Structure formats: C-alpha cells, structure tokens
Image (cartoon, grey):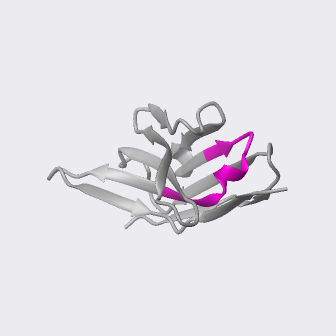
C-alpha cells in the first residue's frame, strides 16, 4: 500500500505564498487522479485542485488563478503552489491519490494532512 506524506504547511501572512508537497512511498504513475483537499475548522472537506495522469487539471473556483497543482513522476511527488493566500485559505490540507481498479472500484489513499494558517 502506497503511503503519502504531506509537508510545506505553516503560518504565512495574507498575500504570501506556500508550496505544499505530497511524497508517495511508491510510484504515482499507477494512479489516475491526484488531488489536494482542505478542511477548515467546522467545515466539510473540499476539493482544492486535482491533476490526472494525463496532466489535466481542475481547481475550485475559490483558488483559480492563485493555486497551481503539479506532479513530478520521477520524484513520486505532487505539489500545490499557493500564492496570494487569504485568511479563508486557512485549513488542514490533505493529499489524495485515486486509482481506478479493473473491477471499476476506486482505491483511495490519503495523507495525514498539513496545516496552513494565513494570518497577520
């Protein structure tokens, strides 16, 4: 079973930037979709950005133009570059990898999360 470790979170001032990393213990080439989610206190977990094995990307409206998701297959790592951060971006950020099995079922692997706090 592939394991994920997120890093790069922390405290940043509004308008600042952070780059999150999600390192997999095995190859990410076998996963169909890789995504970043976030969960703020008292709120449901939501999709922030996703990238497919073909390189297509999708973003939540709230982060379009500010966040960029990317992947490095050689390093088995998925990144989330976050610019122009706002206080409402404060949350725990989670990485998730999804593999579509031959049965049609989905295999989902989650990381442990990394906290991001945007505050002056």
On screen, residue 97 above or below 50? below
Left or right relative to 81: residue 105: left
Residue situated in front as seen by the camera: 91 or 19: 91
Query: Which quadrant, please, contains the N terminus?
Result: bottom left
Residue shown at 35%/59% (left/top)? 108
Q: Which residue is the extreme one toward the front?
A: 42
On screen, residue 105 above or below 82? below
Residue situated in front as seen by the camera: 33 or 15: 15
Q: Which residues are magenta?
A: 80-95
Give the total number of marks visible in the rendering.
0
Q: Which residue is the extreme one toward the left?
A: 103
Image coordinates for residue 11, horizontal then vertical, percent: 78, 60
Q: Examine the structure image and report whether residue 81 is included in the region drawn in magenta.
A: yes
Residue shown at 47%/42% (left/top)? 50
Q: Which residue is the extreme one toward the right?
A: 120
Residue situated in front as seen by the camera: 53 or 118: 118
Left or right relative to 16: residue 81: left
Q: Examine the structure image and report whether residue 79 is included in the region drawn in magenta.
A: no
Query: Which quadrant, please, contains the C terminus?
Result: bottom right
Residue shown at 14%/53% (left/top)? 103
Image coordinates for residue 93, horizontal then vertical, percent: 57, 58
Image coordinates for residue 67, horizontal then vertical, percent: 63, 39
On screen, residue 14 above or below 25? above
Q: Choose top left, top right, bottom left or bottom right for residue 42.
A: bottom right
Image coordinates for residue 114, horizontal then vertical, percent: 62, 64
């Amino acid at each position: 079973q592939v394991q994920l470790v997120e890093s790069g979170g922390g405290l940043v001032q509004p308008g600042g930037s952070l780059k999150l990393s999600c390192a997999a213990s095995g190859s990410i080439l076998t996963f169909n979709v890789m995504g970043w989610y976030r969960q703020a206190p008292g709120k449901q977990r939501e999709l922030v950005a996703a990238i497919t094995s073909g390189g297509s990307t999708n973003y939540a409206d709230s982060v379009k133009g500010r966040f960029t998701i990317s992947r490095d297959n050689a390093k088995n790592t998925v990144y989330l570059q976050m610019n122009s951060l706002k206080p409402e971006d404060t949350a725990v950020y989670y990485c998730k990898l999804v593999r579509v099995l031959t049965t049609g079922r989905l295999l989902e692997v989650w990381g442990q999360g990394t906290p991001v706090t945007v505050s002056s």
